[in-house]
Amino acid sequence: MTSRHGTLDQFATWARKVIAHHGATVAGDPRSAEVFQSSTMSALLDGVYDGDITIEELLRHGDFGLGTFNRLDGEMVILDGVCYHLRSDGSATVANRTDRSPFAAVTHFTPGITLTVDAPTSRSGVLELIDQTVESPNLIYAVRVTGALSNVHTRTVKAQTPPYPPLTEASDGQAEKTFDHVNGVLVGFRTPEFEQGISVAGYHLHFLDDARTSGGHVLDFTLDAGHIAISTASELHLRLPTSGAFLQADLVGEDVSAQIHHAEGGD
Ligand code: ZN
């Protein structure tokens, strides 16, 4: 009995040390946070729409992020540890943990910087404000904009059937929607230019309304009033698929930037 308790005590002490060390790292420099990304934007452009990572596994790497689902069946928002599935009719539901994703990026959101917007501000105004606030264009920033929006223009990709067309073609058939006078949250990232192709350089935002019942990939918006929270990351954990179409995909297209702009809109 005594030795068994001794072992348990040793384990508890060790566990406390590990947890304390982890906490100290995060508290020491929140910028050391990691973005975990599954597959690449260039693979999505090339029509690699089936991935092997589950929502369950994604949620182990972060509580905040975005992406899409297998077959390109809609847009993904991860907020406060819950994964939402946004479909081409603009509806949103909580995703199944067994669903899989061909492309997603998540982080543990730590709002190191917060800004308040108290007058109607356009998308470019909000993004400029963030650009002026962040320390460097060469780090990764998770961005959460919460508030009242006079409009949000979204699009949501539709589920595809094999043989899959490239994303520039698939996105031509996307459903667009405008939400007027809505409260909600914009969830996404500001990614450095040098990551173009691995990810979407510049801003990539998805919208989810306050009721958590509708949303989409953001093309444009006007924020009437709200708060911007920014979480800095300096580590990128890139998980590449080890099976399926990714292995044969052509991922070195010369016009990656133009294709991303065509498919994703915005920057
Ligand atoms: Zn998107």
Image (tube, rainbow, N blue to C red):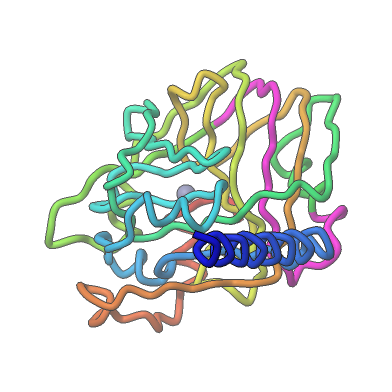
Give residue 148's position: percent from left, percent from top.
69, 21
- Magenta stretch encompasses residue 39: no
Give residue 65's position: percent from left, percent from top.
54, 49
Q: Report the quarter where the C terminus lies.
A: bottom right
Q: Residue at x 42, y 65 (%)?
A: 38
In this view, the residue farthest toward the top is 181
How many numbered discs? 0
Q: Which residues are magenta?
A: 131-152
Q: Tell me if 182 is positioned left or right of 77 in this view.
A: right
User: In the displayed structure, would residue 34 be above or below residue 144?
Assistant: below
Q: Tell me if 199 is positioned left or right of 113 in this view.
A: left
Q: Residue at x 42, y 44 (%)?
A: 76
Give residue 43's position: percent from left, percent from top.
35, 70
Q: Nearer the viewer, residue 260 or 185?
A: 185
State which quadrant residue 114 falls in.
top right
In this view, the residue farthest toward the left is 162
Q: Residue at x 63, y 77 (%)?
A: 194
Q: Residue at x 47, y 55 (%)?
A: 60
